[in-house]
Image (tube, grey):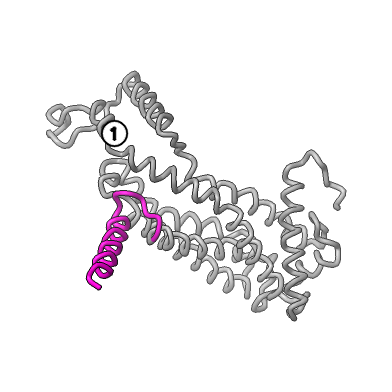
Amino acid sequence: MPESWSLLNPLAWLEAAVSGVLVAAHALLAAAGLDPAGGAAWTAAVVVLVVVVRVALLPLVVRGLRAAHRSAALAPQLRALQARYSRPAGSTAGGGRPRLTRDPADLARLRAEQTALYREAGVSPLAPLLPALLQVPVMIALARVLDGAARGHAVGLLTPVLALQAGAATVLGAPLSGSLLGGGAGALLGGVLVLVVASTTWATTYLQLTRGTDSAALEGPAGQAQRATVWLLPLVMAATSAAVPLGLLVYWATSAVWSLGQQLAVLRWLPTPGSPAAAARDARRGAASRAVTAR
């Protein structure tokens, strides 16, 4: 362990866990015939890390889906509640659609009643976000492991020899510790990885919005904000990807591809009630049932 190791440091434990998965995966890949000092082995080890993390998070994903379904069932009550705290159409400028009140006291009562509805239904608005939030410390730990390897320092369970190997490993001539801003081969590989991250993030968000969300939930300011995320989120991901190590970009790209596949599976088998995907699933089930009856 490095000198900075401390039993009371949560990040140190996380670095040990992340580096431990990398070391174990690297050993298995080397035993399978990959060059232990080559970039392919270390890149594949990062991919294995993504699979381990995302599989470990699946129970939280399922819990988040159930929370999202319960929240969707509350949508009519939430819309009725917001309507109670909206100005009549005739009092808005130009006689347009009703707008939510701006009175601080009314807004406080609205938030309290919304919270009570969520609590009564056993819904946590943060539940669907937990899998993404929990990946943040994992990526921080991976970035620290890669940074230490780039400087030849043992971090977590990486031995000095493995740290030197990981720091020197290259993919298509680009070091995994390099970045898109570093120029050369790293800029080319980084550009490809950023494109993968941005495009798959866009596709995942677009599918969720157009296939996995009730059209009624996309009305009003909240719906406009959701539509904006389809373009805003990929742009933010692309902008923040420029300076991170290529090894971490491999993690992001692999995780983004996993998220897209997971989204497609959810839309087909566990769609949100009231969404176009749920209607398509019910239509498939009806067609299958009629086909069985006709036999």
Residue displayed at 28% across by 31% down? 82
- Please, is residue 38 above or below residue 194 in the view? below
Front residue of 279/284: it is 284
| x and y percentages locating residue 235 in the rendered image | 45, 57
Q: Give the secondary structure at mark 1.
A: helix
Q: Is residue 186 magenta?
A: no
- Please, is residue 250 above or below residue 53 in the view? below
First to last magenta residue range: 269-295
Front residue of 84/249: it is 84
| x and y percentages locating residue 222 in the rendered image | 33, 41
Residue displayed at 66% across by 71% down? 44
In the drawing, does residue 202 fall left or right of residue 20?
left
Q: Is residue 283 magenta?
A: yes
Residue displayed at 37% across by 59% down? 207
**Magenta stretch, overall SS:** helix
Identity of the residue furthest to the top in this view: 105
In the drawing, does residue 125 fall left or right of residue 156?
left
Which of the 4 image quadrants contains residue 189?
Answer: bottom right
- Please, is residue 177 above or below residue 115 in the view? below
Residue displayed at 55% across by 64% down? 253
Identity of the residue furthest to the bottom in this view: 33
Disc 1 marks which residue? 77
Front residue of 107/210: it is 210
Say which quadrant the C terminus sits in: bottom left
| x and y percentages locating residue 264 in the rendered image | 42, 63
The amino acid beneath tag 1 is Gln
* Label 1 environment density (alpha carbons within 10 Å; few <14, some 14–19, many ≥20): few
